[in-house]
Amino acid sequence: MTETISGHRGLVMDEPLLFEQDEAGRTGVDLAEPEDLECRLGGLERKGRIGLPGLSEPQIVRHFTRLSQKNYAIDSGLYPLGSCTMKHNPRLNEKVVRLEGFAHAHPLQPVSTVQGCLDVIATLAHWLTTLTGMPGVAMSPAAGAHGELAGLMTIRAALEDRGDARKRVLVPESAHGTNPATAAHCGYEVDAIPANDRGRLDLDAFKQALDDDVAALMLTNPNTCGLFENDIIEVARLLHDAGGFFYCDGANFNAIVGRVRPGDLGVDAMHINLHKTFSTPHGGGGPGSGPVVLSEALVPYAPLPYVVADGDDYHLVEHDEGGKSFGRLRAFHGQMGMFVRALSYMMSHGSDGLRQVAEDAVLNANYVMKRLKGTYHAAYPAPCMHECLFDDQSLKDTGVTTLDIAKAMIDEGFHPMTMYFPLVVHGAMLIEPTETESKQSLDQFCDTMVGLMRRAKEGDAEWFHTAPHLAPWRRLDETAAARHPVLTWQPPGGEEAAA
Ligand SMILES: *Cc1c(COP(=O)(O)O)cnc(C)c1O
């Protein structure tokens, strides 16, 4: 790629940090010099610059606009990141959430003035319990991982209440990293259960690991290989017989919503990532929302606060005097903006539409699986659920790795698929197209994937190793970035300028 004089490329601008664009005294506002200024800081007045960059308004506008243009998003193209469910976020949701009563509500307002918001929370809770076939739901968790924490704390409270201090939590090897992390954070010993050769929980290994010290099993269904755990009813029965609780990671609920009710499978607690299944925008660490549905046995131990209806009025239960709630998980009642968007999504789809969401998500994933399976090695034979999993067997002897394919995808204008997860498969490539992609965009994606494999087989490994070639940044040293992160910016004048 030829270098340019400016550092820009096409209309993609080289974007320095605001601090690097700094010019002392430059400002976006024109304030008059104050007369008779009297310092009221008792000698603490500023002696020099504090290191904030001097910038004009157009500079700031351009800076953030350019950064936003560098940001690949579901609104700019296909985002096949497996497990993350990067589906289209309907604009209707955005319109509804900007209604003044929702957008301007404050969590410390008197309850009588936010009845509409509480109605949204209660209605959404009703739909979540209906769709899952579970009697209760805790709405406050702020993400899937936070929902896992809420679920395990509820389970621990229930066990403690019956004087049963169990120590172990079983987690399949294919689980999302948050599962063992949550269990460990709750003070449990985590025991990994291997997958069988069909990509499901190994039932015999599970039976062997199960005893009366097991507090819970955390199982994802459909699992992170994109497969339905078809022994799930037997698993739930064995677990309950041993006195343990069944935690289901519901991040993949989008594959079965409207078709399967987890409550019918024997699940005791399951978080629902509203930002995945119910389309609220997410990425880069937030926002999220992870309500946890709970079985009859767990409902009394659920976290505070919760909403109760009293005739036409809604109340918030903030304290649980004499009750069994394990307490409060966070300051307020949950992610209101996500609640409104998720409810808007549900109501605009209706029950038939939600069922179709699951069906089309599965259809699209199987289409991709079918188109790629002759070229890439499918980790498990089709059919899959909402995502398809390939390993790196087909790349053998090419010198090209899963990472190289992902980097080359960036040059091709696609966000890479999920790589090296789940861990049960070598060089995993996990592709989740979601139901909102058209056949054309799926075909373009598949053609690109097939083309890259052809290139890899033609012996172009060197080209792959230096990809991406067309992105603003070339291949980054990810190890150095993780080991020696540069988290502070030093002003050019050093300490003197910062004083
Ligand atoms: C996304 C995901 C999580 C974690 O959810 P967050 O909302 O990101 O905290 C847990 N398990 C699985 C399988 C997931 O895909």
Image (cartoon, rainbow, N blue to C red):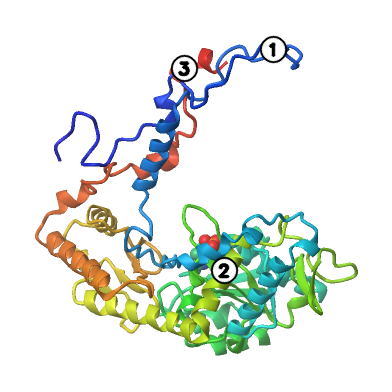
Q: Which residue is mark 3?
A: 24
Q: Is residue 34 above or below residue 11?
A: above
Q: For the residue marked with disc 3, what is the amino acid?
A: Ala
Q: Quadrant of residue 155?
A: bottom right
Crowding near the residue tagged with mark 2, few <14, some 14–19, many ≥20 C-alpha atoms within 10 Å: some
Residue 137 visible to an observer of this rendering: yes
Tell me whether the residue at label 3 lies in contact with that at label 1, contact meaning CB atoms closer than 8 angstroms: no
Q: Dot 3: what SS?
A: loop
Mark nearest the camera among 1 and 2 is 1
339 lies left or right of 64: right
Q: Earlier in the sequence, mark 3 or mark 2?
A: 3
Q: CA distance from mark 3 to mark 2?
A: 58 Å
Q: Which residue is mark 2?
A: 191
Tell me whether the residue at label 1 lies in contact with that at label 2, contact meaning CB atoms closer than 8 angstroms: no
457 lies left or right of 9: left
Q: Which residue is mark 1?
A: 37
